[in-house]
Image (cartoon, rainbow, N blue to C red):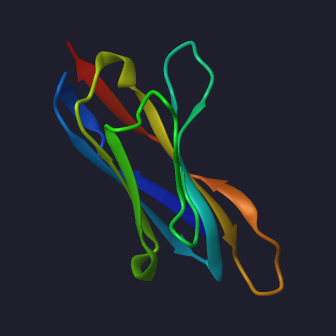
Amino acid sequence: QVQLVESGGGLVRAGGSLTLSCLASGSTYSINTMGWYRQAPGKQRELVATITSDRNTNYADSVKGRFTIARDYAKNTMYLQMNDLKPEDTAVYYCNGQVRPRITAPASDYWGQGTQVTVSS
């Protein structure tokens, strides 16, 4: 069984910083692309950033230059460093991973339970 667990959310003032972490555990034979998504109240879930197994990154235009995604491949952990936070960044942030649980199994999408980020003005 694969588990993705986020941590690091909280309440911060505009202009502040937070770092989110996502730990993948359980049966994780290999992990391909991982990413952060967010969902604000009344809105659809949207892509924030992704990082591939060979460190290629992709960011939503709204966070470019402010957020940085990274992975520690040895620890199966992904991070999202968020700087210069704005009230519009307020959302539940979800970790996603394309995980192959066993050598005999295909990769599938797995999601964490989400962590709340609230930015006050």
Residue located at (45% from left, 38% from top): 93
Q: How many marks?
A: 0
Residue located at (20% from left, 38% from top): 17
Q: Quadrant of the C terminus?
A: top left
Image location (x, y in percent) of residue 44: 63, 22
Q: Quadrant of residue 45?
A: top right
Q: Is residue 115 left or right of residue 44?
A: left
Query: Is residue 112 visible in the rendered structure shown here?
Result: no
Q: Is residue 25 left or right of residue 85?
A: right
Q: Is residue 26 left or right of residue 66?
A: right
Work out whether 33 lies above or below 84.
below
Image location (x, y in percent) of residue 52: 58, 64
Q: Quadrant of residue 109?
A: bottom right
Q: Is residue 60 left or right of residue 44?
A: left
Work out whether 30 lies above or below 93.
below
Q: Quadrant of the N terminus?
A: bottom right
Residue projecting furthest to the bottom: 103
Image location (x, y in percent) of residue 5: 45, 57
Work out whether 52 lies above or below 28.
above
Residue located at (26% from left, 28% from top): 85
Work out whether 82 lies above or below 119.
below
Given residues 113 and 46, the one toward you in this image is 46
Residue located at (61% from left, 72% from top): 31
Query: Is residue 109 visible in the rendered structure shown here?
Result: yes
